[in-house]
Amino acid sequence: MPAGRRVVITGVASHWGAELARRLERDPSIDYLAGIDTVPPQVELERTDLIEADIRGPLLSRLLPGMGADTVVHCGILWYPERDKPARVLHDVNVIGTLQLLAACERTETLERVVVRGSAAIYGCEGPSPSFFTEQMARRLPLRTRFQRDISELEGYFENFARRHPRLVCCMLRYQPEIGPDLDMPLVRYLNLPVVPTQLGFDPRLQLLHADDATGALQAATGNPVRGAVNVAPSGSISLSHILRLARRPSLPIPHPLFGPALERLGQRLGAGPVYGDGVRLLRFGRGVDNRRLRTEVGYEPRFDAVAAVRDFSTKSRGRRVVPSLHPGELARRLARAGG
């Protein structure tokens, strides 16, 4: 990254925004680093200027131009609902918030690059999917869930913004789900259940990105963004049954028509809320993406492939339980009631 950079991170209170800020604080080539969010991050940041603001409001259009930023990194997209907040907040933050941020970027004359931490959900999850989606395959399959459609809508805004401002380098990072023993996220809680419900007759192939690679790829794209979409994922893939063997977790196969209602009932405990439908489809059909553009153009080589990421997660999380109060017998009874 050239000397004298001024970087602004939106969503700095999120795990990924805070981790990026911690790494960039150690980069001497960055003169100024700011983080924007409605609440402070849970980690201590030493030289990040923390600014309390909601990206959904018009205040951002007055704040950002005066900060002299040449790089904006948007980490404020929510994959899961916020606790104690209505489900519509997910849409408001992801779509309306992104639109407001882009409006603020239009007013920032010093801006040179915009990097967005998005989602591979734009490819959908269907049975007749390719083994690995390339970046050109977005929206070719139906987008059946609200989250998938939200991601498509915000990417549409981003693509229009990039076309209107060809001088800017606009990079959309399409992340696969992350995994790590210290991540407090629904997928990690699901894999740490004492008995893991699965869909009878389906064994999806997944790409779970190691948490270190998730931050490493974001840092690399901040320093060397490329135009357009970039898939962020480990190399290769791994079946759900193999994941559970490595994690030493027994499975509870459920007929797939009953799996959705069961996961909906379990979703409140996992923190998935209204996006449990995305999990149902991912855990039925799986999803793989091609990461060649990340490796060859952004220049980031993931340290962990798909199998190694799960092995590391399993080793470090062995003995931990995210939901210790749920006995295997009680889980089975709850799932049975959900299907009844």
Image (cartoon, rainbow, N blue to C red):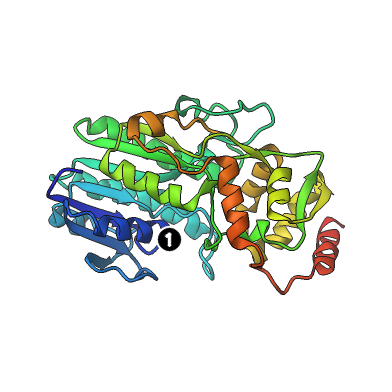
Is 29 rendered above or below residue 333?
above
Residue 54: tell me if it is visible: yes
Q: Position of residue 266 (x, y in %)?
A: 71, 62
Image point (18%, 54%), residue name? 28
Give above or below for 3 relative to 320: above
Q: Of helix, strand and loop, which one carries label 1?
A: helix
The type of residue carrying mark 1 is: His
Left or right of 305? Residue 280 is right
Residue for point 46% across, 32% down = 291
Specify the quadrant that holds the C terminus. bottom right
185 or 23: nearer the eye?
A: 23
Near-viewer residue (18 or 256): 18
Q: Residues within 10 Å of mark 1 (few under 14, many from 20)?
A: some
On screen, residue 277 above or below 152: below
User: Which image quadrant is residue 192 in?
Assistant: bottom right
Q: Give the left or right position of residue 308, taking residue 3 as reference.
A: right
Residue 315 in the image: state x and y as whole percent: 61, 57
Which residue sits at x=36%, y=61%?
18
**Residue labelled with disc 1:** 15
Q: Is residue 161 visible?
A: no
Q: Nearer the viewer, residue 80 or 98?
A: 80
> In this image, 216 relative to 256: left or right?
left
Q: How many marks?
A: 1
Residue at 61 percent of width and 62 percent of height: 317
Residue 131's x, y, as percent? Answer: 61, 27
Instruction: Locate the N terminus and report the quarter of the image it occupies.
Output: top left
Quadrant of the image occupied by residue 328: bottom right
